[in-house]
Image (cartoon, rainbow, N blue to C red):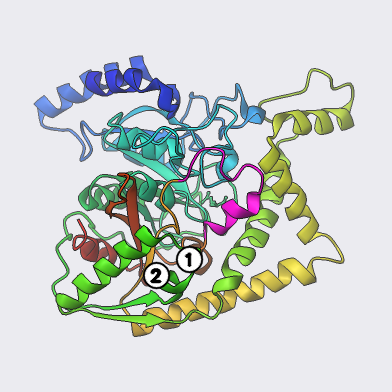
Amino acid sequence: VKSYLSRIRDNAHLNAFNEVFEQEALSRSKTIDARIKAGNAGRLAGMVIGIKDNICYKDHKVTASSKILNGFTSIYSSTIVERLLAEDVIIIGRCNCDEFAMGASNENSYYGPVKNYADTSRVPGGSSGGSAVAVQAGMCHASIGTDTGGSVRQPASFCGLVGLKPTYGSISRHGIIAYASSFDQVGPITRSVEDAALLLEIMAGADEYDSTLARKPVTAYRDELKPAGSKKRIAYLQESLSSPGVDDEVKGSLIGYIEKLRADGHTVKPVAFEYLDYIVPTYYILAMAEASSNLARYDGVHYGYRSPAATDLLTTYKRSRSEGFGKEVKRRIMLGTFVLSAGYYDAYYAKAQKVRRLIREKTDSLLEEFDFILTPTAPEPAFALGKTEKDPVVMYLYDIFTVQASLAGVPAISLPAGATNKGLPLGLQLLAKRFAEQELLNFSKYFL
Ligand code: GLN
């Protein structure tokens, strides 16, 4: 704990943490040390982690990196925090992120942007950028993020780490600040596949507070982890190599792995995904619609920030929300409200639901034919801070490879896949069938 705390101090300029629980972590380490000596410690005894600042932890502040939750203290813990603590994890602090997890660069935070440890002029990815940099820069052993459309996988890829988004319905969302509820999933960011397997195993499984969870027993992912024995069938999207929007070094890394997989006897085939152009618009219509509904609760009365200029109920709502939410969050609330409004609902929201079904069915049918789908995690390596400032759509389009798994609800993992000439980390993504996490983790060992 002491060594992580000193790394945190030395790297304060990266802005990875919104708050560090220094005293708590130190005193907890003593308690756990005693338990280790007594031989009754949990499976995570000694593991020091950071949690994204949209995960509730009883009697601790939680802000989702928004001004509107500034000063808010959670009165209960999320299910995942309870499960991690029960196994003697040490939570060292809450990690910076994009406001309400909306973004792909961690620049939309009320507490300022996070910087990539590999190159501080570049973004760490987002929205779980602080969680990724905390691990990348050695400020904790592993971290927990949330992934709605790529927020665990893409920052893991920008920081050279392993990022897992489990099957929708694997991990409880109870106590996770909601962004888009039909997509949101918690996921670990780690250096190894072993740690990802162990953290998944401990966090996953039924919870009476989340009715969307599968009621099946949780696999012992960590103990069952072994390199995949048989030869696999792998599909890759042909557009990931043909599209001019994909960086040459990203393509080079993908080609390298395709050739290596083939040389090792696996079947790797290009496939066409005819809905590729609809993936990003469908995701954003649905995610914004759900966000506009989820964020209606921040009214200046129930939680956090209330405008001092409010004089009556209506100005309490208007002023608190106008002053409390950042620009990107407001944009999404307005667009989400628009696509749900009478007259536009059928043209946008209902249509996007239908296209989501098509994307899900096509993804499922590919995963019947193949064991995995292989893609780059992101079309470019970590980009410069400020690059997407003028045009939010540029940033939305960067999600092209990550949102497919989110729309389909299937598991996906981002794995480190070398670096660019300038030393920026590259990542590759694998998608698998729903609840095929064990196969996914086993095959991930091939890359690491
Ligand atoms: N970049 C995507 C968005 O802004 C995904 C974010 C996330 O997964 N939370 O919605």
Find the distance from the CA under tag 2 to the CA under tag 1: 7 Å
Q: Which residue is mark 1?
A: 409
Question: Looking at the image, is 207 positioned above or below residue 445?
Answer: above
Q: Amino acid at mark 2?
A: Arg
**Which of the marked residues, 2 or 1, is nearer the chain's N terminus?**
1
* Residue 291 point in image, percent of width and height: 66, 50
**Magenta residue check for 395:** yes
* Residue 180 point in image, percent of width and height: 60, 53
Question: Looking at the image, is 262 positioned above or below residue 318?
Answer: below
Mark 2 closeness class: few <14, some 14–19, many ≥20 residues within 10 Å: some
Q: Quadrant of residue 436?
A: bottom left
Where disc 2 sits, the SS reads loop
**Magenta residue check for 7:** no
Q: Is residue 146 left or right of residue 341?
A: left
State if disc 1 and disc 2 touch (CB < 8 Å).
yes
Mark 1 closeness class: few <14, some 14–19, many ≥20 residues within 10 Å: many
For the record, the magenta segment spans 383-399
Q: Amino acid at mark 1?
A: Gly
* Residue 162 point in image, percent of width and height: 30, 50
Question: Looking at the image, is 21 positioned above or below residue 447?
Answer: above
- The answer to whether residue 412 shows anywhere in this view is no
Q: Is residue 36 left or right of residue 172?
A: left
Q: Which residue is mark 2?
A: 434
Which quadrant does the C terminus fall into?
Answer: bottom left
* Residue 333 point in image, percent of width and height: 73, 47
Residue at x-position 32% and y-position 64%: 252
Most common SS among magenta residues: loop
